[in-house]
């Protein structure tokens, strides 16, 4: 299924969603955000086991489309950011692991998109920036996701200076998981999503959702919550079967 702004391709258990507005530097316009949210919701309700977010053209994404803000009303722009936040929340609410496959520049909301994905693989040529600090509109919403990946001081350096970081720095800081030569990007991303989708679908979905809930809690609350989830999941038939299979092998 393809839309006006996206290409959607399924190969086996993996769905790749490709931003496909290279002439607009894959800007996250309001129509694109709405389409992406709908596509993600459809994937979430399917039997797919993993999702890759990619992009066509020389740039991964330049962030928000300024045409959605120039000359618009306050309420129009507030709605734009509500739509963007809803899409980002949808990414993390999916039961499937989501991996960003990043080449070229990912700036502002484009960088936010990478930070919001569960995992990310970057080509050596990739760069990342939240450059609003260089101009008149600070990158307030991208900073929410980026800071949760790389910490306060590094996130504020990116936001206040507006300077781009290269892929190796992004990996060192925790914004992406792996950096590979450009020619290996597709294969490396497929390898990561394949490994990330091992195990049962129910266990992986519960693990992902529990992670995002507990990470915002205090440590005592997180342990209490995670313990309850783990105890409940241990009662699952597939989990019980795996326990008994392991014990039977040890007793042979």
Image (cartoon, grey):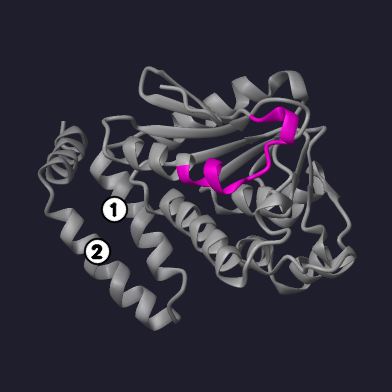
Q: Is residue 173 magenta?
A: no
- 161 or 86: nearer the viewer: 86
The quarter of the displayed image where residue 237 is located: top left
Q: Residue 100: horizontal and vertical position, in percent?
A: 58, 39
| Quadrant in which the C terminus is drawn | top left
Q: Residue at x 38, y 67 (%)?
A: 213
Towards the viewer: 106 or 26: 26
Helix, strand, or loop for circle 1? helix
Q: Is residue 150 visible?
A: yes
Label 1 vs label 2, nearer the camera = 1
Q: Tell me where residue 70 appears, x and y as whole percent.
A: 73, 58
Q: Which residue is mark 1?
A: 206
**For marks 1 and 2 on the same chain, the one whose residue lies earlier in the sequence:** 1
- Tell me where residue 193 appears, x and y as whole percent: 48, 32
Q: Secondary structure at mark 2?
A: helix
For the record, the magenta segment spans 21-34
**Label drawn at residue 229:** 2
């Amino acid at each position: 299924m393809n839309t006006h702004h996206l290409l959607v391709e399924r190969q086996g258990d993996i769905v790749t969603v490709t931003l496909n507005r290279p002439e607009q530097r894959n800007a996250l316009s309001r129509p694109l955000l709405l389409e992406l949210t709908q596509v993600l919701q459809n994937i979430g309700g399917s039997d797919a086991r993993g999702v890759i977010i990619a992009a066509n053209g020389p740039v991964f994404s330049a962030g928000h489309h300024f045409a959605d803000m120039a000359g618009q009303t306050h309420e129009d722009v507030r709605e734009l950011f509500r739509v963007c936040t809803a899409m980002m929340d949808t990414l993390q609410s999916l039961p499937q692991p989501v991996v960003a496959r990043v080449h070229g520049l990912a700036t502002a909301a484009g960088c936010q998109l990478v930070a919001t994905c569960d995992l990310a693989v970057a080509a050596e040529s990739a760069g990342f920036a939240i450059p609003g600090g260089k101009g008149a509109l600070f990158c307030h919403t991208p900073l929410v996701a980026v800071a949760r990946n790389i910490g306060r001081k590094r996130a504020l350096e990116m936001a206040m200076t507006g300077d781009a970081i290269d892929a190796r720095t992004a990996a060192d800081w925790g914004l992406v998981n792996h950096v590979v030569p450009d020619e290996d990007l597709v294969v490396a991303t497929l390898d990561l999503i394949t490994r990330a989708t091992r195990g049962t679908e129910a266990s992986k979905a519960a693990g992902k959702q529990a992670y995002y809930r507990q990470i915002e809690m205090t440590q005592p609350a997180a342990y209490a919550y995670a313990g309850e989830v783990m105890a409940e999941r241990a009662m699952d038939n597939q989990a019980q079967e795996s326990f008994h299979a392991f014990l039977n092998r040890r007793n042979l």
